[in-house]
Amino acid sequence: MRYVLGEKKMKTRRSERLIDMTRYLLERPHTLISLAFFADRYESAKSSISEDLGILRRTFMIRGIGVLETLPGAGGGVIFTPGISKKEATEFVEETSKKLVEPNRILPGGYLYLTDLLADPELLRNVGRMIATQYSQSSIDVVMTVATKGIPIAQSVANFLNIPFVIVRRDSKITEGSTISVNYASGSSDRVEKMELSKRSLEEGSRVLVVDDFMKGGGTINGLRSLISEFNAIFVGATVFAENININSQFGDSDVTSIFKVTKIDTKNRVLNVEPGNYLANTDFSYFE
Amino acid sequence: MRYVLGEKKMKTRRSERLIDMTRYLLERPHTLISLAFFADRYESAKSSISEDLGILRRTFMIRGIGVLETLPGAGGGVIFTPGISKKEATEFVEETSKKLVEPNRILPGGYLYLTDLLADPELLRNVGRMIATQYSQSSIDVVMTVATKGIPIAQSVANFLNIPFVIVRRDSKITEGSTISVNYASGSSDRVEKMELSKRSLEEGSRVLVVDDFMKGGGTINGLRSLISEFNAIFVGATVFAENININSQFGDSDVTSIFKVTKIDTKNRVLNVEPGNYLANTDFSYFE
């Protein structure tokens, strides 16, 4: 009789645990959480928590949420790594391409209006999840972008990697304190511009992932690379939402990844051509499949 | 026998459904989702889905995740409204105050270094959840901020309200297309500055929530209000992370909400005083408690 009652109570508690653990893990990716923590949080036996985690692991995998890995031993626990499957990423690229080729996105000077897309919570979540998938095994310490339009992407990636992000600025702002600055050649023109970052916002030796909305020539990414060197930090890679390959890129494929490639912007005839970038080729999805 | 097997199958499925539904709902707040959608997604009876939702509703409430409301009838379904309890919000304000009063945050000119805090995923999530709680019943269409440091807050609030956000800029950028601009008096000085927003990024009649990182005098918020009028949109309210009340604010308490009030910045003696702002008083938490 005691067992039956016990079991009944466990059943109710299990569903509550699963719901709360799902939320807890989704909000704390890439973080080791001990079984003891969950056992304490739910006043449950470690063996029950262990079973819960088995259910979570299976469901996370089936539903494409990510990988829940168990590290054994005294210092062990679980780590949730959010990620996307190649299939889902490919679908996203195909769907979003359709939105990108709308002719009213063409702006004077070969630019593309992306503001609406980069303000959409669902799109940002998918972009963040995709870039976080690409670097899920790369021990990134900080995401870097340059103001303004790369910020939402940086924030979304930082959320999925559960690390901070830093914003490099083209204008000096008093509220940043002392800064380190570099000059860089803007790729699309021959102008020399300046970018700077608050001194205390990046630690020496940090492993940095650069993200941005649009790459036209690559001068900005080059500038960010020299800025990272000035801080004695490490450039791990750069991924942009879209690149314009009309302008000859200064990079090889392994250095800069793009989700989309704009292969043609004909302002006069309002024709726009967008293709998948090298993201799908540059990303190893095997951990999530 | 058939029932026993069926029930066994249902049990396994229920835990999977609960995990996936939690993720699904967390990612789509303020959105009506029909029971039929879930029934189809999980190939389950509506009655089972209805039971699942009961468990989710109870757990979301107990664990302070938010409110899951059921709308009856043919066009009905469930809507998830994320929110924070007054207790949790108060704890956040107390904990974060301790981080804010670190003397090395004092910058020349009475500014405060907040860059590290506003780059921390967990802090941003809490700030976003708090501001979304304040406006959870206000039918907001769009979150507005001014570049650069308000952007992470805007994005987080937009995520919890599941609506887009727009970024007003102080510098003109070619990639925005045509813009509407206003001049405004910078509150802390007598300078007249300019801010502008891409024409197509805000629709007439939109209900706008303004957020920003730091308010010093309120000139920026006033500028944003006139910009909103220029677009024939509606200013619903403004909430800032922190305000400096050394400078006399141009607003009444009902117009602008602050989570923190900096009541003293003594640059010379490196003394800093931070108090809770009017956020806790201006927010009706009853829906979430």
Image (cartoon, coloured by chain):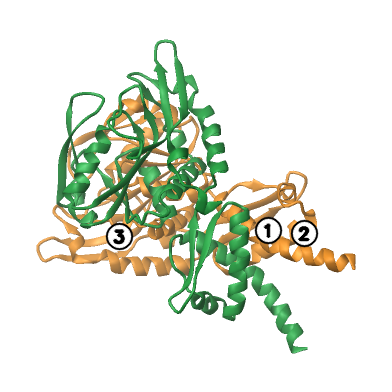
Chain colours: A orange, B green
Q: Chain of mark 1?
A: A
Marker disc for residue A17: 1
Front of the two marks 3 and 2: 2
Q: Position of residue A164 (x, y in %)?
A: 48, 40
Residue A48: assigned label: 2
Both marks 3 and 1 on one chain? yes
**Callout 3: helix, strand or loop?**
strand
Task: Report the Cα–Cα distance between label 3 and label 2.
Answer: 49 Å
Residue B105: name its quadrant: top left
CA distance separating discs 1 and 2: 10 Å
Q: Residue furthest top?
A: B269
Give the camera-side residue of B142 and B19. B142
The residue carrying mark 3 is A261
Q: Dots 1 and 2: beta carbons under 8 Å?
A: yes
Residue drawn at point x = 44 percent, y = 10 percent = B269
Between discs 3 and 2, the one toward the N terminus: 2
Q: In the picture, residue A92 is in which quadrant?
A: bottom left
Q: Chain of mark 2?
A: A
Q: Secondary structure at mark 2?
A: helix
What kind of element bears circle 1? helix
The part of the image, by quadrant, that contains residue B59 is bottom right
Residue drawn 57% across the image and 76% down it? B42
